[in-house]
Amino acid sequence: MTPLAFAEKYGFHIVVEGAGGCRDIEGAYCCDLLSMVMGRAKENDAFVTVMANINTIAVAVLADVACVILCEGIHFDDACIARAEQQEVCVLETEESSFAVALKLGKELGLC
């Protein structure tokens, strides 16, 4: 399932489409410690976090994740959005908790 299809199905807000329509989510990584994400997130994971700063976009690019999903009603500022657009990083937002998002991803990926 693409990040855009996931967002549409669950009512998440699409902040930046990026490459979200042309790659599939293959896994999920939930973490707010960016150094751990750099070393442990896998290519095409959905990166689920509440960390909304410019470094989040940089880590998403380095880890080559399918998308960033900001939870708990957290928003990127304009500079972060501009960087995500420049780097073609798909960014989604939701009011839901990271746990709730992880459950949805697990269901879609057949993990639970």
Image (cartoon, helix red, strand yellow):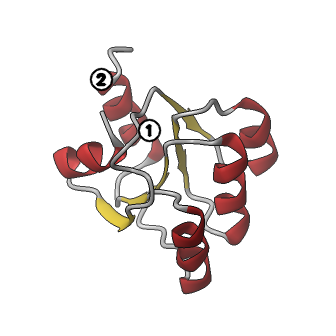
Q: Quadrant of residue 12?
A: bottom left
The amino acid sitting under disc 1 is: Phe
The amino acid sitting under disc 2 is: Lys
Residue 79 in picture, x, y percent from top left: 61, 83
Point out the residue furthest to the front here: 22
Instruction: Give how far apart the Cα atoms at labels 1 and 2 are.
Output: 12 Å
State which tag comes first along the sequence, 1 or 2.
Answer: 1
Residue 29 in picture, x, y percent from top left: 57, 34
Label 2 crowd bin: few (<14), some (14–19), many (20+), radius 10 Å: few
> Front-most of 101 and 37?
37
Image quadrant containing the C terminus: top left
Point out the residue furthest to the bottom here: 78
- Please name the residue shown 20% across and 51% down the image: 8
Image quadrant containing the N terminus: top left
Q: Which residue is mark 1?
A: 99
Residue 42 in picture, x, y percent from top left: 63, 30
Q: Is residue 64 above or below residue 14?
A: above
- Please name the residue shown 20% across and 54% down the image: 11
Q: Which mark, by number, is residue 107?
A: 2
Residue 107 in picture, x, y percent from top left: 29, 23
> Front-most of 22 and 81?
22
Point out the residue furthest to the top here: 111
| Horizontal relation, residue 91 to residue 13: left or right | right
> Front-most of 73 and 88?
88
| Horizontal relation, residue 73 to residue 81: left or right | left
